[in-house]
Image (tube, rainbow, N blue to C red):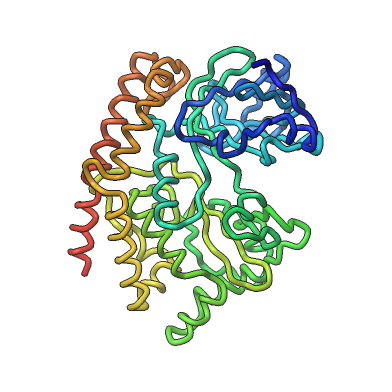
Amino acid sequence: MGRRICGLAVVFAACAFGQTAEDFFSDKVLHDIRITIHPKDWNALVENYLDNTYYPATLEWRDLVIENVGIRSKGRTSRRATKPGLRVDFNRYEEQEFLGLKAVLLDNNVSDFGMMRERLASILWREMGLPAPRETHARLFVNGKYMGVYTLLEDTDKRYLRQWFKEDSGWLYEFVHRDSYRFEYLGSDPEAYVPVLFKPETNESHPEGEVIAEMLRVINQSSDQDFPKAIEEYLDVKAFLTHMAAESYVAEWDGILSDAGVNNLYFYRFSGGKRGMVLFKDKDLSFNGIEYEVLKNAGNNVLMRRLMAVPDWKAFLYDEIRRAAALAGATDGLLDQQVQVIYGQIREAALADELKECSNGVCPVYESNAEFERHVEFLRDFARKRADEVVRQLGLMQ
């Protein structure tokens, strides 16, 4: 079958011939994604990889081609000139979508030497009943050059909100990390929170930072007696505790309870009220050790400390951690099986990826191949042993 070049959304819908976003994010295969971009634009992106400048490009997947998309470098600590992470905006330059998607992300996996932590975490989140992006793996080619194995994941945008919540008119914020911040109250000025800590991704013209400020005031200043009822006006507490149970199970080093303070979350406040929900973001630094401390730093985080002081919520949290352990399983359990499946999909392509890194940075491919195999073996070990370790730790915490 020949290549089908698709343009505007109304044309592309007819051009796709039954292929869907589900096919694009299918986790049953290793995908091939090809990007064509003017060499001077690619060189500019690489040279200025710390910038968010977009460049026009064409994306090809299977026999579908979509032209005039925008691509830019993405990531925080994972930004690289050698193997750039990419954000692809299909409607950057014209009103078009790709299989109903306005944007997708291509993570370069340079912080994840086993190349599958992010995808494994998203699987567990969905098993826990929590929103998480669809993720799969792809070989990326830019102007015909093999750039290596990337994690392909959907963007957290209005379409994502509709998929999970059947609405998209609320307030979506991306949390912006600041060292040592742990949900403290910084005063009543909304500008102390938005956009410096909570960057609006929707409703940018009226971000309503005063609601965020009031939520932080309740977290910090409400009395012990008033806190349980007051906080539920602003936060889906049980969903938050389930999220924390999942982060604890996967030994998340760079999440809400990180040593350096709160990091890596979206917060969505539903339309028609003040209540919101914490959402999944960036789990490529999870799975940090079989014996990693459950609920490490919980006592240093204002919100977690206060929630765990409520007996019913503490009991619910512990039960959710046990549920995560049961869902993840041990040998031949969910995560163990997924490690095997993903490894089978990506191994050959990963070994051919000359741009992947070692823990000490850029290294010869024979060294990065050995590091890849070691980290996959560690993930197998984690999948088989973490559940028992988590249950053991919880027993000591009772």
* Position in image of residue 53 (x %, y %): 71, 32
- Between 198 and 35, the one lying in front of the other is 35
Residue at figure coordinates x 70%, y 55% from the top left:
202
| Residue 358 visible somewhere in the drawing | yes
Residue 122 rendering spot, x and y as whole percentages: 44, 46
User: Would residue 208 appear left or right of 248 to someone viewing this image?
Assistant: right
Q: From this view, report whether residue 53 is shown above or below residue 314.
A: above
Tell which residue pokes out farthest to the bottom in this image: 225
196 to the left or right of 109: right
Q: Quadrant of the N terminus?
A: top right
Q: Position of residue 173 (x, y in %)?
A: 62, 56
Asked where in the image residue 218 lies, by quadrant, the reply is: bottom right
* Residue plotted at (39% across, 41% down): 120
On screen, residue 84 above or below 75? above
- Seen at 49% across and 20% down, the residue is 148
Q: Is residue 47 visible?
A: no
The x, y position of residue 227, in whole percent, is: 47, 81
Q: What is the tally of numbered marks visible in this picture?
A: 0
Quarter containing the C terminus = bottom left
Q: Is residue 182 above or below residue 176?
A: below
**In-front residue for pair 291/60:** 60
Foreground of the two, 140 or 287: 140
At 43% from the left edge and 48% from the top edge, which residue is drawn? 254
